[in-house]
Amino acid sequence: MSPTRVGVITFPGTLDDVDAARAVRIAGAEAVPLWHGDHDLRGVDAVVVPGGFSYGDYLRAGAIASLAPIMREVVDAAGRGLPVLGICNGFQILCEAGLLPGALVANAGLTFLCRDVVLRVDNASTAWTRDYTGGDELLIPLKSQEGRFVAAPDTLSELEDTGRVVFRYRDGAPNGASNGIAGVTNAGGNVVGLMPHPEHATDALTGPSTDGLGLFRSVLAGVTA
Amino acid sequence: MARVVVDVMPKPEILDVQGQAVSRALGRIGVSGVSDVRQGKHFELEVSDGVDDETLHRLAGSLLANPVIEDWTVTRL
């Protein structure tokens, strides 16, 4: 069986695309570089929108990147069920693109947070969390300035009532995120966004754990719910 | 009490890369005919009646704006 091909997008200002591609390879898939200015997903089986500061966070974090040519393709493909994972700035981009509900705003303390956090997996049935079991706890680095997830009250209720909160900060949200939410999914379960960086927790040499590998393993061909 | 608005804009001779990025993004949402975008900041202040214009310009120039790269206007509403 040919390896699963996972696309990793690079925008101007993206900085975690290399780590994301490495995480994809460690998980056993092929990493396929995708360029923000192309209308071409190169036939990949899944897409990672990595972290960084796309377009220097001009206007609003993720706002301009959400309109890039590649994102037109991502939005269309996500609508057809393609697994899409947004990490940190990628999460912001997916929210700005309308693929995920809510928004990411400045941390409650107004400071850039860089620390390892424990995430609890609240939904282990999405395309990106099937490798986990509900209730699993993951030690994952968080590094963000605008990482506080917020949403309208009715949207929050809907997310909670339909099990679309995927990850929660176990020990309370250091950024003040509503309901301690660290990651959410769309109605179809194929699009997931989270603020912490699982790609930085895939190698014991450079990360606090290898707990992040499960996200990248979840989309491997042959992995079933 | 009075409502005061301070608008801060990049100086004309300063390359506004943020505005340029917004300008290019407009094309992506199918908007044409916008030749230039410059992005600044808009502050709304509640000030007591004793605060004079000189003080307002001083706070604008020393905190809200960087006089090296930005101009500002003070408007009493």
Image (cartoon, coloured by chain):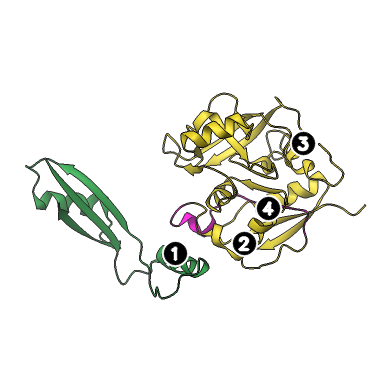
Chain colours: A yellow, B green
What residue is shown at x 59% (from left), y 60% (from top)? A11
Q: Is residue B10 left or right of residue A164?
A: left
Q: Position of residue A38 (x, y in %)?
A: 65, 68
What residue is shown at x 42% (from left), y 34% (from top)? A109
Q: Is residue B11 left or right of residue A33?
A: left
Q: In this figure, which residue is indicated by the disc labeled 4?
A: A78
Crowding around mark 3 (Cα neighbors within 10 Å: few <14, some 14 to 19, many 20+) is many
Q: In this figure, which residue is indicated by the disc labeled 3?
A: A130
Q: Give the chain letter at badge 3.
A: A
A7 or A165: nearer the eye?
A165
Q: Position of residue A149 (x, y in %)?
A: 51, 38
Q: In this figure, which residue is indicated by the disc labeled 1?
A: B22
Give the amino acid type for the residue marked by disc 3 in the picture.
Answer: Arg
Mark 3–mark 1 Cα distance, whole angstroms, equals 38 Å
Q: Is residue A140 left or right of residue A64?
A: right
| Labels in figure, total | 4
Mark 4–mark 1 Cα distance, whole angstroms, equals 25 Å
Secondary structure under tag 2 reads: helix
Tell me if residue A144 comes above or below residue A2 in the rendering: above
Q: Position of residue A178 (x, y in %)?
A: 50, 32
Which mark lies nearer to you, 4 or 3? 4
Q: Give the chain letter at badge 1.
A: B
Q: Residue furthest right?
A: A1
Q: Is label 3 on the same chain as label 1?
A: no
Quadrant containing the C terminus of chain A is: top right
Tell me if residue B27 comes above or below residue A80 in the rendering: below
Q: In this figure, which residue is indicated by the disc labeled 2?
A: A72
Answer whether labels 3 and 1 touch (C-beta < 8 Å). no
What residue is shown at x 49% (from left), y 57% (from top)? A56
Q: Position of residue A9 (x, y in %)?
A: 66, 58
Q: Which residues are magenta?
A: A44-60
